[in-house]
Image (cartoon, rainbow, N blue to C red):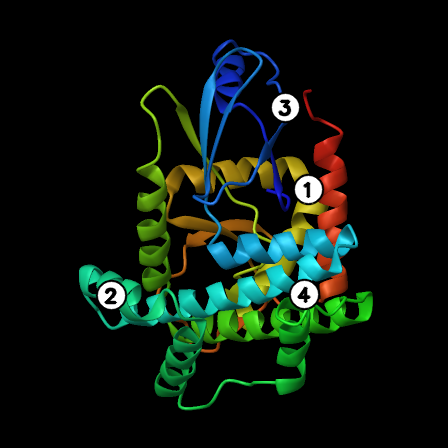
Amino acid sequence: MVGRVVYSPCMKCFDKYIENNSFPDFSFYENLMSESGVIHFECKMGHKNAILIQEKSFEILLELAIENLVDKYYREAIFNFASAQERCFEFFIELISLDNDVNDEFYENMWKRIFKSSSERQLGAFYFLYLMRFKKSFSYDDKKTRIRNNVIHRGNIATKEMAFEYGEYVLNNIYDIVQSVTENINIDVLDKFVSKSMMKRKSEIKTDEFVSTMSGSIISWQVATDEELERENKLLEYSRKKPDEYSKMANKANGFGNKVLDVNNEGELILIDAPSNNLKKGAKYRGRTSLGELINNFTKMRDAYKANIKR
């Protein structure tokens, strides 16, 4: 997924190549992102595809804002950054409801009746729930909010400086929310949220479509203890020195399902039990990335995909 355009291969073609023991076709097709999060397209062989985008709404909107910055559409960038922040607030509200075992039907009815058509009410609900859950207030900058209001509501011409200033502000707010969630809420609740979202998207699939999923968020959700981070660095170094052995052991770990790789004190590659999904003591969010770095990553990804498009 890269912004407004989704670059996707035909997974039916991929499967057929694998079945025939031949090199798979990695051609990419250019498709527009949809509101529903499901991409429908037909490949050159006539295969009908339905691709389920796994990213949350705020992640998709954030990527659109990054694309706008790259393409110098600064007003659109501010608009999409603002939308991404609002949808991140909505994500948090729903997640806290799930964490407190609120009935899905009760939540949906309340959201539609009271919050859906009012961003002010959504904002109030977010700030109050954040305060109740973490016993501290969420940061708020009136100056940055005025940038958004002046551009969107008063028709001010957005400059590059305004777009980047507001983008950095929103990005940091989203990282603050993601960090609070990943460090304090069990991953099972996050999985429940994702499953609920995917069920909605699956309802749009047609019977004659080949279904696959796509995940490529520009937001990292990595949470790890210092020990786990050290283990990852050791594994990275081992994979560089002995790629063949590392690949064989990685395949072996995948076969078990509940095992992961580790490097012991003697420098040997071994299998250990996979860590629990429960919150781990000392685990910290490791996913913060600067806006400039996200822009560089986006540009490289888009250029790489474009080189493989089938017209």
Indicate which label's residue lies in the foreground, 1 or 3. Answer: 3
* Pointer 1 or 3: first along the chain: 3
**Do residues under tags 3 and 2 come within 8 Å of each other at their CB atoms?**
no
Mark 3 neighbour density, 10 Å: few (under 14) some (14–19) many (20 or more): some
Q: Which residue is mark 1?
A: 242
Residue 50 drawn at (x, y percent):
44, 29
Residue corresponding to mark 4: 289
Residue 176 spot, x, y in % from top left: 54, 75
| Circle on res. 107 | 2
Position of 42 compared to 92: left or right?
right
Q: Residue furthest bottom?
A: 136
**Amino acid under label 1?**
Lys
Distance of label 1 from label 3 (alpha carbons): 27 Å
In the depicted view, which residue is nearer to us: 215 or 273? Answer: 215
The x and y percentages for residue 260 are: 46, 50
Is residue 309 at all visible to an observer of this figure? yes
Give whichever of discs 1 and 4 has the lower sequence position: 1
- C-alpha separation, residue under disc 1 versus residue under disc 4: 30 Å
Q: Which mark is residue 26?
A: 3
Residue drawn at point x = 62 percent, y = 79 percent: 145
Callouts 1 and 3 close, C-beta under 8 Å: no
Q: Amino acid at mark 2?
A: Tyr
Residue 253 lies left or right of residue 160; in this view the side is: left
N-terminal of the pair, mark 1 or mark 2, is 2
Q: Give the secondary structure at mark 3.
A: loop
Secondary structure at numbered mark 1: loop
Residue found at x 26% / y 66%: 113
Cα separation between marks 3 and 4: 29 Å
Q: Residue at x 65, y 57 (%)?
A: 65
Q: Residue at x 52, y 44 (%)?
A: 215
